[in-house]
Amino acid sequence: MFPVLFRFGDISVYAYGVLLALAFAAGIFGLARTARRAGLPEEKMFDMSLMIMVASVIGSRLLYILIEWPLFVADPLAVFAVRSGGLSFHGGLAAGVLTGLWYTHRHRLPQGKIADLIAPLVALGYAIVRIGCLLNGCCFGRPAAVPWALPAAYMDPTLRHPTQLYASAAAFLIFMVLLYRRKRVRFHGQLFLEFVVYYSIYRFLSEFYRETDVFLGALTLGQAASLVVAVACFVAIRIWPLGLKKR
């Protein structure tokens, strides 16, 4: 693994932070470009993107801290060690969605339409960040004997499922599917709901190969959360069209 990309004297530049910044940059400038085509105010999209970025990082870190609470009780200063990873996507997604809903409501912007513009960019950003996870040696898989197994955990030579690469490939596939689906939805907001369903399916399956603890029966916390969120979004798509139907 290569957690440190390079150094400037005593300053280390970490791979995870660089890829996280790259993911947010792709999302912010991607939204500005698509918003222009959709006739939405670019300056408001830029402001909203920055707020969502900050909220999602805070939300993802808070949920991770809650999940791993005993570790942070033993070492409280580890709360600030974000450069080593430790971000929960579900927490970041929830915080980002709430922030986006608040901002669009306050500025009277079309929520469903904007959510559909954001959906593919979230998938693309997730694909980028998971490369950072591989370089950082976090979010690794279980020990495996498959031909493509890698020493995917930091400071551990054990060959494992490279779940970071599984995640990146799945997210990029979701990104391509969403681009294909964007003109084939029935109502504004559907594409974002579909993204959550696709992500939840991937996450549920990938947890079987990921090094993590069970949470509820035979399910991990990620699987339990994915089931709940996927069912809720599927129901919303089927019986509760958000926003105005397309003409």
Image: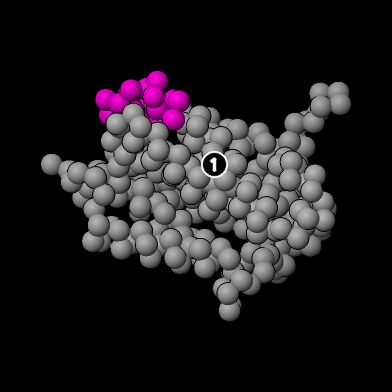
Q: Is residue 38 magenta?
A: yes
Find numbered disc 1 in the image and state the secondary structure of the residue it sits on: helix
The one of 69 and 26 positioned closer to us in this rendering: 69
Q: Residue at x 53, y 53 (%)?
A: 90
* Few, some or many residues within 10 Å of mark 1 (<14, 14–19, 20+): many
Quarter where residue 43 is shown: top left
Q: Residue at x 82, y 56 (%)?
A: 74
Q: Amino acid at mark 1?
A: Ser
The one of 189 and 181 positioned closer to us in this rendering: 189
Q: Residue at x 51, y 63 (%)?
A: 225
Q: Is residue 109 magenta?
A: no
Q: What secondary structure is the stretch in magenta mostly built from?
A: helix
Q: Residue at x 26, y 49 (%)?
A: 242
Q: Is residue 151 visible?
A: no
Q: Which residues are magenta?
A: 31-48
Q: Position of residue 173 (x, y in %)?
A: 44, 51
* Quadrant of the image containing the C terminus: top left
Question: Which residue of the protein is positioned furthest toward the front in this rendering?
Answer: 106
Asked if 155 appears above or below 53 in the picture, the reply is below
Q: Position of residue 228 (x, y in %)?
A: 44, 65
Asked if 72 appears above or below 183 in the picture, the reply is below
Q: Position of residue 235 (x, y in %)?
A: 30, 63
Q: Is residue 43 visible?
A: yes
Residue with the mark numbered 1: 56
Quarter where residue 129 is shown: top right
Q: Position of residue 170 (x, y in %)?
A: 49, 54
